[in-house]
Structure formats: structure tokens, C-alpha cells
Image (cartoon, rainbow, N blue to C red):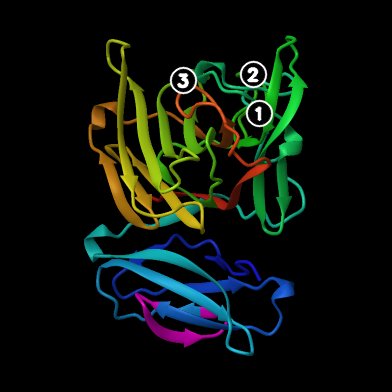
Amino acid sequence: MNDPIAVAMSGQKPEFVVGGTMTVDVSVPPETGNVVYVWYLNGISVAAGTSYTTPTDLIAGVYRIDVTSFTPDGSRAGSTTYTFRVLDLDQDSNWNLVFEDEFNGTSLDTNKWTTCYWWDRDGCTNLGNNELEWYQPDDVLVCGGTVKLRAQRREITAWDGTTYDYTSGMITTGRESSDKTLPAKFLFQYGYAEIRARIPMGKGLWPAFWLLPATHISRPEIDVMEILGDEPNTVHMNFHYLNADESRGDSGKVWAGTDFFTGWHTIAVDWQPDYIIWYVDGIERWRFMDAARVPSEPLYLIANLAVGGDWPGSPDASTPFPSYFEIDYIRVWTREN
């Protein structure tokens, strides 16, 4: 049995103020049968069952919840991890969930997503990076409670006669065309955007979750996460912006410490008027504090699995195809104030 547990937050952001509480539920796949779920808080067994409510006496800090399933004979069937933060009272801020997709259906919700950049012509790519894929809607697969962005070795000819050796999948809440009078699927200005995903491993694979402006120019760009398939324990967090004189600026941080290939992980960005903070599994890993350069315009979401390009290089004989960038959910919260 392969990782049969999915944790659902039921619309809650994974943080609350001292004295508060939070309930975490397990979404039980029908094929798991009669399994027992055991909950651990920071490594200590605290409950059994399909849900767990945190105690009200937790002090401010970051906490880890692990839930493990066991079959009737005591064998371990699967596990997953979730992190949350308890805030001091002076950190209190009300959050509203303004966008979410749990990918629980059997097809992509086209009210929320499109499957190409705004320059879509029966597919698209990113020539600015010299990428090797041609994005296609049939490489976006919704099933089993996730969306799978599939990269495969498949020859295809684009509208301009260019032949690509790979196709792949992407989803975006941007516009479906270059016509800026049309609305984007979803835009937000300031908020907390989070993805829960597991990434593929292999040379030349480049999964990413990022934000771009509705103006259709390339900056500001907030890269919540970029991971190279041959460095699956390293996440790249980047911010690309324009200076006052229109010159380009770039800032970023690399964090290594966990294997994003072998399990589910949450990666998020908290974008506010005077800062941007990146989180990996609920723990802050980098912050950008130059308020004059923080974006103050609406941005849209992109998740994609690129193949090749200047940075990751081309796939080699060891790269597995098809490969999948699998996403459990994408959510965005904004502060009431």
C-alpha cells in the first residue's frame, strides 16, 4: 500500500493564536480498508482515529503533526506530515481563504485554471529559458485527489513548425489569451499562497510554483519554489523585480535539507506590502525585506513541470519518462486587515 493518507485542513490556514485550536482530518481512500490512524505531535503519540484536535495550551512556535496508518496486523501502511504555527497575541491577523483547489474531481476546473501561458497557440513553451517542452492539456491529469503534471518523451510539432521532443503539463490562473481586456482566472494582491506537492526526480526536470503579474510582463516574479530534478533535496526561492530605473534586480535563497521526491511537502510564500517570507513545511526559510521593491500589483498563480532549458540542462538517459509533478492542493489566503 503506497502512501494512502491525505491530510485535509478543511479550509483552515495552518496557524492560529495562543489559546486557539485546530482540527486536522484524514481523507481516507476507499481502498485502504480497516486501518488504524495514530497521531503524533512533535514525535509524541497523542491520539488515534481519523481526526485530531490540537490542545488549547500550546505556546507560540512551530509544531509538527505526523499521522501514521497501521493495518489490523500491525504493519505500517503509510504516513504523512503537516506543520502549523501558533502565534503570539500580537501576531494575530484574521485570514480569509480566497482560492483553493483540492483536485478532488476527475477533470481540471476550467473556472480556476487554464493549461498554457497567455501566448497559447494549441500549446506553448517558454523560449526565454530555452525550454524543450511543448505544454499540452492532456498532460494535466486530475485523479485520485491530486493533479499530476506529466512530462513525457513525445514528438510534437508546434504551430510555427518547430518540433519538440517532449510534452508536459502546466496550470495557471492567468488569462487564456493575450487580450488584457479579458479577466484572468484568479488574481490576488498580497496574501499567503501554499502548495502541497511531491516532485519528480531526474536530470532536466524542473517543477515550479510561482507568481506573475496581470500586465503580461515578466516582472515582478515571485518564485515560491523551483526544484531541479537532479537536486531533489534543494529548493530555490527567488524574487525577480524591476528597479526604479527599469533595470532588473534578482534576489534569492537556496535551502537544502529534505528530499522533496520521496514524500509530500508544503511550500508557501507570505506576500505582504513590506515583505515576502518563504516557508518550507511551515518553517520560515527566507525573507525579502526591501519594501520599496515588494510587488504592489495583482499576481496570478502558475504551477508547471518544465523539461530542459538553460538552467536544468537537457534530460539524459537516466531521466525517467513519463515523470509527474503531483499536487495535492493549492490555496491562497488574504488578511482581513
Circles 2, 1 touching at the beta carbon (< 8 Å): yes
Q: Secondary structure at mark 2?
A: loop
On screen, residue 275 above or below 21: above
Q: Secondary structure at mark 1?
A: loop
Residue 113, quarter of the rendered image: top right
Left or right for 135, reference 282: right
On screen, residue 189 above or below 32: above
The image shows residue 291 at horizontal and vertical percentages of 25, 32
Circles 3, 2 touching at the beta carbon (< 8 Å): no
| Residue at image coords 32%, 45% | 255
The image shows residue 138 at horizontal and vertical percentages of 76, 37
Answer few, some or many: residues within 10 Å of disc 3's Cα (few below 14, many 20 plus, some between 14 and 19).
few
Q: Secondary structure at mark 3?
A: loop
Q: As rendered, which of 141 and 118 lies closer to the eye? A: 141
Alpha-carbon span between mark 3 and mark 2: 13 Å
- Residue stretch in magenta: 41-51
Q: What mark, if any, has residue 119 been given in the picture? A: 2
Q: Earlier in the sequence, mark 3 or mark 1?
A: 1
Residue under numbered circle 1: 116
Answer few, some or many: residues within 10 Å of disc 1's Cα (few below 14, many 20 plus, some between 14 and 19).
many
The image shows residue 24 at horizontal and vertical percentages of 50, 72
Residue under numbered circle 3: 218
The image shows residue 47 at horizontal and vertical percentages of 46, 86
| Residue at image coords 43%, 54% | 259
Residue 131, quarter of the rendered image: top right
